[in-house]
Amino acid sequence: MKHTSGSWDEPSFPAHPTVAVDAIILFEPGKIVLIKRRFPPFKDFWALPGGIVKYGESVEEALLREVKEETGLTVKIKKLVGVYSNPNRDPRGHVISICFLCEFSDGVLKASSDAADINVFSLEEVSSLQLAFDHLKMIIDSGVL
């Protein structure tokens, strides 16, 4: 975020890295939740639910908010999977993503307006899908695949 004339503006992608979160949601044993992206980059690719951390928000709060907004689900964070900081991982700019493994707690699966679709996939199916960003690496790193 940049400071201008006494107030904070939130540019889409500032000159410094942006922090994001991603969730690997274990919906039931051997199955995870993915959303199909409605907009670029990676339009029509499957992706992990997640998004940008807002100013004043912890990464855990951001993760729970983004999961609820994008999927309609409430989850329990099980563990930190990793931090993904390759400056070229997102074509829009330098985005550092913090990925968590989560477990479904409650809610009804429902795609948000920025998702073209939402589905639960078996881990076998996931490895054959076109996934956005470095999300396949995140899933592999989590140890579930």
Image (spheres, rainbow, N blue to C red):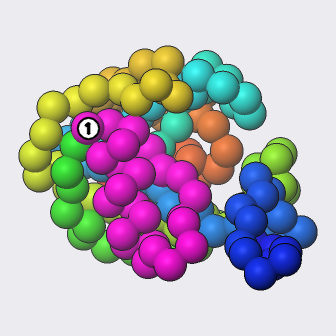
- The reply, left or right, for residue 107 in relation to residue 69 is left
Query: Could you tell me which residue is drawn at 58 percent across and 34 percent down?
Result: 131
Q: Residue furthest left?
A: 106
Q: Is residue 24 above or below residue 115?
A: below
Q: Residue furthest right?
A: 15
Query: Could you tell me which residue is drawn at 48 percent across and 56 percent down?
Result: 22
In magenta stretch: residue 60: yes
Where in the figure is residue 99, as x and y percent of width and height?
Answer: 48, 64
Q: Residue furthest front?
A: 5
**Label 1 environment density (alpha carbons within 10 Å; few <14, some 14–19, many ≥20):** some
Report the front residue among 49 and 14: 14
**Screen quadrant of the N terminus:** bottom right
Circle 1: residue type: Gly
Q: Is residue 105 above or below residue 108?
A: below
Query: Could you tell me which residue is drawn at 19 percent across and 63 percent down?
Result: 76
Q: Is residue 136 above or below residue 98?
A: above
- The reply, left or right, for residue 29 in relation to residue 111 is left
Query: Could you tell me which residue is drawn at 36 percent across and 69 percent down?
Result: 61
Secondary element at image label 1: loop
Where in the figure is residue 8, as x and y percent of width and height?
Answer: 71, 73
Q: Which residues are magenta?
A: 49-72
Badge count:
1
Report the front residue among 78 and 29: 78
User: Would you say residue 134 is visible in this rendering?
Assistant: yes
User: Would you say residue 138 is visible in this rendering?
Assistant: no
- The reply, left or right, for residue 142 in relation to residue 45 is left
Report the front residue among 132 and 106: 106
In magenta stretch: residue 85: no
Q: Which residue is mark 1?
A: 72
Q: Is residue 47 above or below residue 119?
A: below
Where in the figure is residue 66, as x and y percent of width and height?
Answer: 41, 51
